[in-house]
Image (tube, rainbow, N blue to C red):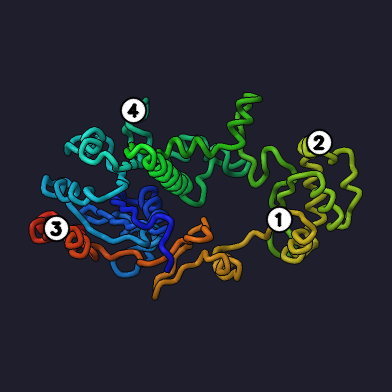
Amino acid sequence: MKAGALAGIRVIDASRVLGGPFCGQILGDHGADVIKVEPPMGDETRAWGPPFVGDAASYFIGVNRNKRDVPIDVTQPLGQELLLRLLEDADVLIENFKIGTLEKWGLGGDELRKRFPRLVHCRISGFGADGPYGGQPGYDAAVQAMTGLMSVNGEPQGEPLRMGVPIIDMVTGMNGVIGILLALQERNRSGEGQFVEATLYDSGVSMLHPHLPNFYLNAKVPQRSGNRHPNICPYDAFATSTVPLFLAVGNNRQFVTLCQVLGKPELGTDERFLTNASRNMHRDALRDELVALLSRRDGQQVSQELVSAGVPCGPVRTIDQVVADPHTHHRGMIVDIDDYRGTGAPVKLSRTPATYRIRPPAFAQHTDEVLKERGIDPAAYASVLPRKPAV
């Protein structure tokens, strides 16, 4: 395997659950040496199943590839000492301890900067350390509610809905990666590390496009619109005789082509539908027309016809269909290591692509290996090195 873009970068991932571990996995996929420091009871996502493989649930397995595992009881002074020894040759620390915890241990930002001036310290948190919500714990669904994402998700007459995936956690993890890479790049000039913060709240607010720009201009509180887009029309899901079809028609040329493929070209010259603005004004009438035209068509077939003609669309598919799709495999989005199967890295680099070297670790799998590499005797820290989860 080629060395990844981050080969030579050493990361201590002392985070748990999703945002931080996802951040660490991305770095590991691109070549960083990532050491996962788990608490004595284990990352709680090891128990978030079924399904399970060995001591880990699928939830844990999904975001802890390409890491070596060293559980440490960092609540004990000896454990804190060991963490500091691991940080001696580290470039990056990722953590999502409760705000104030590191400071309580004497390992706050000022102390870390003093001891390790080149360290990039990335904190994943719910709301940051200060401000009206500073220090509060953050959970994806609660922050989806607080940032307004749920208010615009769901059917017009229905209740606000949580997104079907933990989108804020995952975007926060990605933002953590962006911040770490920016800090490492700046370190090349200054020789100094810095503190990087990615919060669930900031990430949730950042995803409110185009609802926030719309609100800034018209002061209208966005409402739920189901699958409809607030600014583009037609941009919605439609029933066919087989599978649902999502149309994402972004310009006038695509709309004219859509009408031609569906066998009613006169809609493309109808004054009500000439521009995106006019289509938005008459979106209910346009939807009625499209519903009638598509209800008799095979969803897969018409999707292929429209895409071939340059109209963006796609059948609404289930997860098993996505996994079975040859294009998913062609794009390297399914990863197999022995009996492990995971989701591939979405960012492709031509010379230094992501590599998949280590399956998600068993609890304490690499303790002796990692410590001995650094000249540390595991026996000297045996009291803070759990060998199996406490619960």
What's the residue at 23%, 64% (across, down)? 366
Q: Which secondary structure lies at badge 1? A: strand
Foreground disc of the pair 4, 3: 3
Q: Earlier in the sequence, mark 1 or mark 2?
A: 2
Which is closer to the viewer, label 4 or label 2? 4
Residue extending furthest bottom? 338
Q: Which of 70 and 304 is in front in this view?
A: 70
Residue at mark 3:
376
The first of marks 4 and 1 along the sequence is 4
**In the depicted structure, whether residue 290 falls above or below residue 105:** below
Disc 2 element: helix
| Quadrant housing the C terminus | bottom left
Label 3 environment density (alpha carbons within 10 Å; few <14, some 14–19, many ≥20): some
Q: What residue type is labelled 2?
A: Ser
Q: Residue at x 61, y 28 (%)?
A: 215
Residue 390: name its quadrant. Answer: bottom left
Question: Whole-percent x and y of residue 257?
Answer: 83, 53
**Dot 4 and dot 1 residues touching (CB under 8 Å):** no
User: What residue did someone put label 4 on?
Assistant: 130
Q: Going from the N terminus, do you reach mark 4 or mark 3 first?
A: 4
Which of disc 3 and disc 2 is earlier in sequence? Answer: 2
- Residues at discs 1 and 2 in contact (Cβ within 8 Å): no
Determine which of the numbered discs, if any, sits on residue 313 in the image: 1
The residue nearer to you, when weighing 270 against 88, is 88
